[in-house]
Image (cartoon, rainbow, N blue to C red):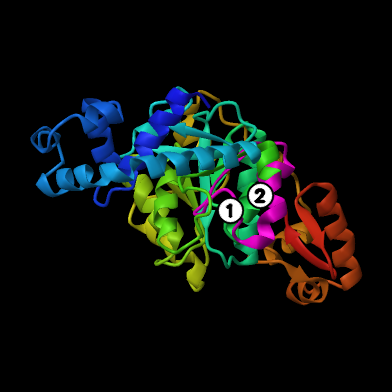
Amino acid sequence: MTSNRLENLSYLKFLLSIEGIGPQKILSIVSRFNSKDILFDNSRTSLNSIEGINSILSQRIIEAKKNYDKIKAETEEEVSKIFKLNGRIITYWDDDYPILLKEIFYPPIILYLLGSLDKLENNNVAIVGTRMPTYYGKQQAEVLSSELAKRNLIVISGMARGIDSVAHKAAINNGGKTIAVIGSGLDIIYPPENKKLFNEIIDQGLVISEFPLGTKPDAQNFPKRNRIISGLSLGTLIIETKLTGGAMQTAAYAIDQNREVFAIPGNINCKQSEGPNSLIQKGEAKLVQNADDIIEELKSKLNIKANKKRVDEHVELNLFEEKLISALQEEPKHIDEISKITSMSVSDCLVNLLMLEFKGMVRQLPGKVFSLN
């Protein structure tokens, strides 16, 4: 990193260290005083003339000047650590800063990146949801993320347990790119069991944070993280969350940012379905059944065409196959339960389930359990 770039980064870190000064105020300050020397040479009266800076904040800036050298030394040390991690730091003013993120009300001033994407493209769709999904939720996250990845869309999520992790893994497994926005420093992997996933994301996408190295995954970090997830995305898909879940917060940010919101409908008796069902009911989210529903809504921005209807919608089924498909609509079932529901023998069920597997409509899970594909 050049000395000039280090100086600029230290200046931004200095401003961020001052209580009461956030992204919008920093944008105002830098537009007026684009270096610390120009800022430090001005009086309290000049500082008061900046939009959003009152006498209290201007006094804090003046008092904080004595801390600048310490902040610069800490910044230099952090840059060295990021370099050792093969990461990089970008700021709001850099050419490779995401255009979509510049459009939100509180854009992060500094971003820390680990990964292989040369540029943060704009074909991004976020998939978020509960940390405790049902089988149905995990299945939908896997299918939707896979379909989007196959269409060369970048899947963005928060690398949390549950829906987030499923979405990232599905994108990776289908040769797609994925971005994880985390609520800690890049040197702290949370949850810890996602270390392998963390490294896979770095290999096939990006891990992004606005938090300095060493920042722990404290609860107050995740709302800030969520605004970046939605801010980086053309649309956000909600898959299973309670009304009070963090995914609902991400949906609210997306609405405020004038981005599209999508939701997978769920069982009305299931707590995990409260959030998406509520968004759909209030007209705040579009009901989604497949990736084409998302792509159709975003096609003017994505500039790609929706797929033709899936082949399985045109597959001819015999009477027994139709009964089996009907039996598996709600959730995966054991072969004995399927036999009971359909009034078919176990052997007849197995024969017809095998035919449905060949047609790509059913898959067998461990323990003689079957589910729709």
Q: Is mark 1 on a helix, strand or loop?
A: loop
Task: Note whether 343 is above or below 249 in the view shown.
Answer: below
Q: Where is residue 274 in the image (x, y as percent from the top left)?
A: 44, 66
What kind of residue is marked 2?
A: Phe
Mark 2 residue element: helix
Q: Is residue 137 visible?
A: yes
The range drawn in magenta is: 170-199
Q: Which disc number belongs to residue 198?
A: 2
* Residue occupying image coordinates x 40% and y 66%: 243
- State if disc 1 and disc 2 touch (CB < 8 Å): yes
Which of the 4 image quadrants contains residue 176?
Answer: top right
Amino acid of disc 1: Met
361 sits to left or right of 20? right
Please rate how many residues cluster around mark 1, counting C-alpha atoms within 10 Å: few if below 14, some from 14 to 19, many from 20: many
Side of 370 relative to 22 (left or right): right
The residue sitting at 46% across, 44% down in the picture is 74
Q: Which of 307 and 341 is in front in this view?
A: 307
Q: Which residue is drawn at 13% across and 49% down?
A: 56
Residue 260 in view (yes/no): no
Residue in view at x 47 percent, y 32 percent: 90
Q: Residue 38 appears at what percent x and percent y?
A: 24, 26
Q: Nearer the viewer, residue 64 or 335?
A: 64
201 part of magenta stretch: no
Image position of 243 with respect to 48: above or below: below
State how far apart marks 2 and 1 are (Cα). 8 Å
Q: Name the residue under label 1.
A: 159
Q: Which residue lies furthest to the left in this view?
A: 45
Which picture quadrant has residue 242?
A: bottom left
